[in-house]
Image (cartoon, helix red, strand yellow):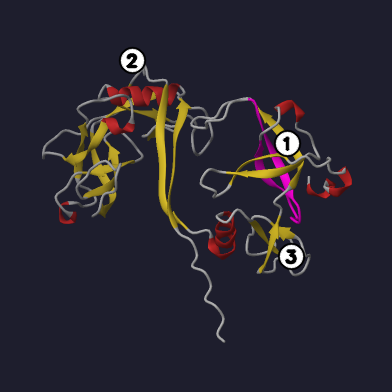
Amino acid sequence: MPPAPAPETLRAPLVVEFPFTRSLGPVQSAFLTGLRERTVLGVRTAGGRVLVPPVEYDPETAAELRELVEVGATGTVTTWAWNPEPRPGQPLTTPFAWVLVRLDGADTALLHALDAPGPDAVRTGMRVRIRWAAERAGAITDIACFEPAESGEPVTEARDHDGAFDDPVTGIVAPARLDYTYSPGRAQTGYLRALADNRTVGERCPSCTKVYVPPRGACPTCGVATTEQVEVGPRGTVTTFCIVNIKARGLDIEVPYVYAHIALDGAGLALHGRIGGIPYDQVRMGLRVEPVWSEDGRYPDHYRPCGEPDADYDTYKELL
C-alpha cells in the first residue's frame, strides 16, 4: 500500500509594516529643511569634496562634518537603470529610470527617479534638473523626480550656506513596509496544523532526544534532521517571567500583565506565552498552567493556573 501523501506546506501573504521615527542632527535637519525650501545642501569635507546627500562624518577620515554648501538643482547622470514596472510607493506610477545624479557643485551622486519616455531617452552623461513637488514638507520626496534639462542651462557652482531656515525640520517618520509570501516549511506547517486542532506538537531529535517546540526541522545542537512528531502539554510550568508595564500600540491588553517562558510537559525547551487568570503579582516560577485557546481556536490566547501544586525547581531548572 503506497504511503499517504505528505500534507501540503502552508503558504500565506505576509505584510510587515511599521513607522520608523528618528530625530535629525544639524546636518540632516538643514538638508531636509532645505528641500522644503527648494534648496539642495551638501557638506564639504576637510579635503574639499562636497557630499550630497550630506553626512555628519567623513566616510574616509571619520572627522565630524558641519560646513554646509548649496549646490545646483541641475546635474549629470552618472549611471542609470530602467524600471518598467513601478511598485506602489515609488516616485512615479509610470515606467521611469532610476538614476544617480551628480548635482552641479557636488562630488557624489544622489539616487532618485528620472521621468523619461523610455530607456532610449536615457544615457549616462545627460543633463537633468530637479522637478520639485507641488507640496513640500521636508523630505526626500520634496524632489518629485528629475527631468531632462533644457539645453544651455548654466552649470551652478557650490556656494557656502549657513543652513539656517525658519521652522527647521527636526524629526521624520518614515513608513517601512515589506510584502512577501511566507512559508513556514514542513516542520512548522505540522505545528500550525496541530494548533488548529487545539494541540501542540514538537519534533524529537534522534540523537539527543530533545523535543523542540515549535519544531525547526533540525536539531540546532546536533545538526541532524528531525521528523518524529511528538505531542506535548497541554499543561506546562512557568520557568521565568517578566511584568509588562508599557502598553503596546494596537494590543488590547491592559497593563500590567505577565509574559512568561513556559515549559510544556514533554518539551525540551520553553516557549513564550502570556499569563492570565491570576493577579500579575502572584505569578511565580514553577507555577503550573494550562492554555486558554483563542476564540477561533487557532492558538493559545494565554495560559492560566491549572490548580496543580507548583513544580519543583529541579524539574525545570535546565529549561530556564
Residue denoted by label 2: 165
Toward the front, the furthest residue is 307
**Which quadrant of the rendered structure holds the N terminus?**
bottom right
Looking at numbered disc 3 in the image, what kind of residue is underneath it?
A: Cys
If you read the primary sequence from the N terminus, does the residue marked by circle 3 or circle 1 appear first?
Answer: 3
Residue at point 23% right, 32% down?
A: 73
10 Å crowding of disc 2: few (<14), some (14-19), many (20+): few
Look at label 1 and name its amino acid. Phe
Residue 257 point in image, percent of width and height: 65, 29
Which region of the structure is painted magenta?
256-275
Residue located beneath label 1 in the image: 241
- Residue 182 lies, in percent from the top left, at 47, 56
Is there CB contact under 8 Å for labels 2 and 1? no
Q: Main secondary structure of the magenta part?
A: strand
Kind of residue sitting beneath label 2: Phe
Of pointers 3 and 2, the one earlier in the residue sequence: 2
Whole-number angstrom distance, CA of label 3 to CA of label 1:
28 Å
Which numbered disc covers residue 222?
Answer: 3
**In the picture provided, is 319 more to the left or to the right than 146?**
right
Left or right: residue 132 compared with residue 203: left
